[in-house]
Image (cartoon, grey):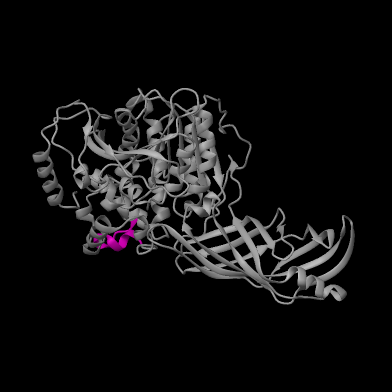
Amino acid sequence: MKILRPTKAMMWGVAASLAFPMMAAHAAPVMGPSGESFYQPPVMAGGAHGDLIWYRNAAANLGANAPAVQAWNVMYHSTDALDASNIVTGTVLVPSTPWSGAGNRPVVSYAVGTHGLAQHCAPSRQIAAGTDYENANIAAALRAGYTVLVTDNPGYTTGKVPTYLAGKAQGHAALDIVAAAAQIPSAGISTNAPTAVWGYSQGGQTAAWAGEMLGSYSSNLNVVGIAAGGTPADFVETAYYLDGSAGSSFLLQAVVGLGEQYPQGIPVDDLANNLGKATIDQVVANDCVFDALFPYMNTSISKYTVGNKSLQQLLQISSVSDTLSAQQLGNKKVSVPIYMYHGQADEFIPLDQHTDLKGKYCRKFTNATFATYPSEHIVTQFQAAPYVLSWLGDRFANKNTAGTCLTFNKKPSSTANPGGGNFVVSLDEWPLDATIKLKTLGQDVVLPEGSAFTADTDMTAGTLDGTLAVPEFLAKLNILLPLDVKLSVVPVGRTTGSASLDNNGQLSVHGDALADITIKSAGFGWLQIPFGCKTETAVEFPVNFDGPISSLGNGNFTFGGETTFPSMKSCGLFNGMFTLLMSGPGQKYSFNIAPPAPKAW
């Protein structure tokens, strides 16, 4: 099935053929054209997978915290899931700072998660525009000093429909970009460099497929590790999990992508009803990942099929069932160590099928490490980054890893919110790192270890509902003389407000946390004089955050500002003194919330 008509692509192809003579197979790579012409493949006699067709200098807007890089776009030969030759594009990023480690600069082939099916959703275009929601992870790998390669995956940028979730094709593309990047003159990239493939969600599928194909497809590369998170390893189980749930848009896109790669297996034109065909046209022409997430949420695939066939009925069609079965992982040993990870509250990709994949790998004597992270799908993608990079750093340094195939830890079970409802990111007792700077005293009060924030951020309803929990604690304050002051911060009501996620992956949270602040006692160590002195009314701490969704997971979910402390009461003879020293406007605060640490399994 070809969902997009080839008219535009054919016009570009004619233009390209006029502008560029036929390129011979195995010809030396050349500088590609500027603008959109770069993405129109030249007429050529062919080439081996991994051959670089052409390249050009590129823009890379990865955010304020990203290091300076040299960047190129590349077009290269690869192979699809049916072993036919195809052409793929991507982005090559090399830190400008010289590599300070031993040997060649390590290479990370970074396999992206779902980006949406429209051509403008391609990572190379998103990276250039500064809108790629995975920029935080890419920048983290660059800060570690690694070359980062980002394939666009088959079908993007070249005027075709992406073969979304055709795992074998994606694995090929992630491996072939390594060989292609090494052919860029003066880029300093070597196929002998220690290399890893890292991906999450769709990218986790890509990375795992790459790992299973290392010996048979790209044995010339020096791949030393695979990191695959949130992986859809069992497509049938994942399809049932997605159908009619918060992640149903991913199932719709999977049907389109697999139908493009396997038109006989999933004949979309025959299976889709008029609404289905119109919806597919919309998704393919216009929608990136967050554009599609909410409009198609909680919609059963039966809404789009002829005769309203259910997922179960579709899977009774042998060609459909065989196509999904062809995407199953775990059939081969991964010949290098693999780091597998998953969010325990993942609402899009079921945890059980990924832990089952670990079992399959371990039974084949793969050196597998598995970790569970406490949150849902999107948060886990970014929380895991420093742990993944630490693990990859050990592989690049040629350190041994025992893996976790032999473990006495209990198998993790899902804590995901029920399917079929709103898209809710639950923060379950997330550690709160908070500091309040008292203006008059000029001193910081640091909230104690054990402080936590629990909340539901409902992206569908647009609401925030949560609460603070802060244990009583001692703070050293100079109130005329240095004192140990026992303080309590007690929430007043719920922390409420709004929460939303826009189509560019930007998170917006706005609300208020109210709390009574009480001076329980003051003194020297254990010698305390009780007071019970507290603010007359609750202190208002505005909760305001606007930034990338990655901040929820990577430790950058911080809100702060200035607030006013009301006058103090119940202080006895010291009422005026405490009011003078602790009350009034200009009290600064900074609250940082991050998910709890992962657990090995």
Viewer-closest of 77 and 533: 533
Tally the marks. 0
Span of residues in magenta: 300-311
Residue 306 sits inside the magenta stretch = yes
The residue positioned 38% from the left and 46% from the top of the image is 235
Viewer-closest of 276 and 460: 460
Q: State the image quarter where residue 480 is shown.
A: bottom right
In the rendered image, the quadrant that contains the C terminus is top right
Viewer-closest of 575 and 341: 575
Q: Is residue 271 above or below residue 368?
A: below
Where is residue 577 shown, x and y percent of the image? 81, 71
Work out whether residue 514 can be spotted: no
The residue positioned 35% from the left and 61% from the top of the image is 300
The residue positioned 24% from the left and 57% from the top of the image is 285
Q: Is residue 493 above or below residue 521?
A: below
Residue 403 sits inside the magenta stretch = no
